[in-house]
Amino acid sequence: MKKLMMPAIAMAAMADSRPKAIIGGVRADGGEDPEVMLKKVSQQLDKLNGEIKQTAEDALKQAKTAGDVSAETKATADKLLAAQTETNKVVEGLKALVEGVDGKVLEISQQVAEGGSGGKSAVMTLGQAVVAEHEKLKNYKGGTLSLTISNAVTTGTGSGGGLIYHEEEREPVRMPRRRLLVRSMLTQAKTGSDQVHYRKQVLRTSGAGMVAETAASGASDFGWDKAVERVKKIATHTNISEEALQDADQLQSEVDGELRYLIDFEEESQIVAGDGVGENLSGLLTEAPAFVAAAGLPNANRIDRLRLALLQITLENYMPAEILLNPTDWAAIELQKVGGTDERYIYGNPGAQATPRLWGKDVAETNTISAGEWLAGDLAMAATYYDRAETEVTLSTEHDQNFIEDMVTMKAKKRVVLAIKRALAMCKGNFTFA
């Protein structure tokens, strides 16, 4: 029992020497820094612990001599023990406060280092902004306290920036594609063989005339030749990794469209200007008769010359329907003015919307025709375009090193025939004037 009562005896013995400021809570002088307060209270606690130890030893000696401890002494000891516990709590609280302030200061310093260039402070949280007003908090003595928190949610990192997301359009911006017009002006057909054979009339001698009764009529002569055109192939390919095809869900369809466009682009180039050598088609400009100006008629500008070209075709007993022009030449025609002081345009009204036409014929603007060149005629009468196999796009992993390199080859191809059956239904020329 005596051993159990030793702490109480010690506390009772030192009751008279206890620091008055500690029992009942820690006092803080106005405006004092938490670190200074912590230092003072820690010193008082150390002193108190030392005195408790010494007094406990003295009380133990007294207990041995007296043999008992009074109820009053026990109550005083309990009060001192409670005071010691409360003082320890105050010390721990002050430590936490100081550590919190130090942490906030460190956090603010790091943010300033990361984003405080150009004289601008880094973005702070609300708690950091309050700590930044620490001087006002230290001098607070009651009443209303106004804190200026000069902080805002911005698009910066650590503020609202993390919530900003960006719209992404999945449709790619493609490179321009030329309007391919010429094929649609030809007669369209299909073939099921590797060659197209047709008969072409090459002779017509008329013996028709007026004859008397019982008189013999004049003889007419006709002749045909067999003509043949071979099916030719237009093709291209590209290589793509298997990973790209798997990871880019639009890639296959995009490449498919690009390959088909390149096939059609080459097709129109061959229809217009193929030279017929090797695997090239024999195009319209290659087969069309050259322009020969009719004598005695105006031939001084673009409009004059195209009218004479239509005349040349008409004199061959065909009815021209189209004129193919480079956009530059068509613009030059539209920009011609009366001249002199008259600024009116010769052709058309700039404010009117109309299909391009000249001398009653449709005008097709195409970059497939070079600037300075032109082609006129009835193209449906002049040529027939046969499809043997329409555009086909295939994929293969068996080309070259594809299998071991995980590559895929995409290939596009088509097989066609162009037969120029009535060349005289066309006329070609240029805008070079002597």
Image (cartoon, grey):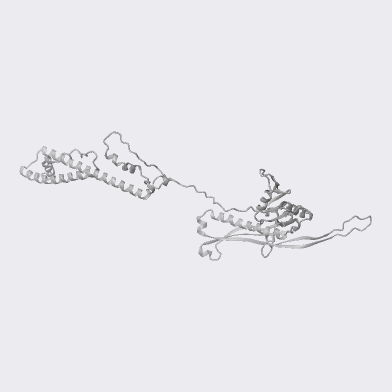
Which residue in the rendered view is the most extreme toward the left?
A: 65
Horizontal and vertical percent position of residue 378: 73, 53
Q: Quadrant of residue 200?
A: bottom right
Which residue in the rendered view is the most extreme toward the top?
A: 143
Horizontal and vertical percent position of residue 225: 78, 63
Q: Is residue 82 left or right of residue 211?
A: left
Q: How many marks?
A: 0
Q: Is residue 180 above or below residue 137?
A: below
Q: Is residue 422 visible?
A: no
Residue at the spot 31% in from the left edge and 48% down from the top edge: 106
Looking at the picture, tell me which residue is in the foreground, 31 or 202.
31
Q: Quadrant of residue 40?
A: top left
Q: Quadrant of residue 129?
A: top left
Q: Is residue 197 left or right of residue 213?
A: left
Residue at the spot 26% in from the left edge and 45% down from the top edge: 98
Quadrant of image for the N terminus: top left
Q: Is residue 15 above or below residue 226?
A: above
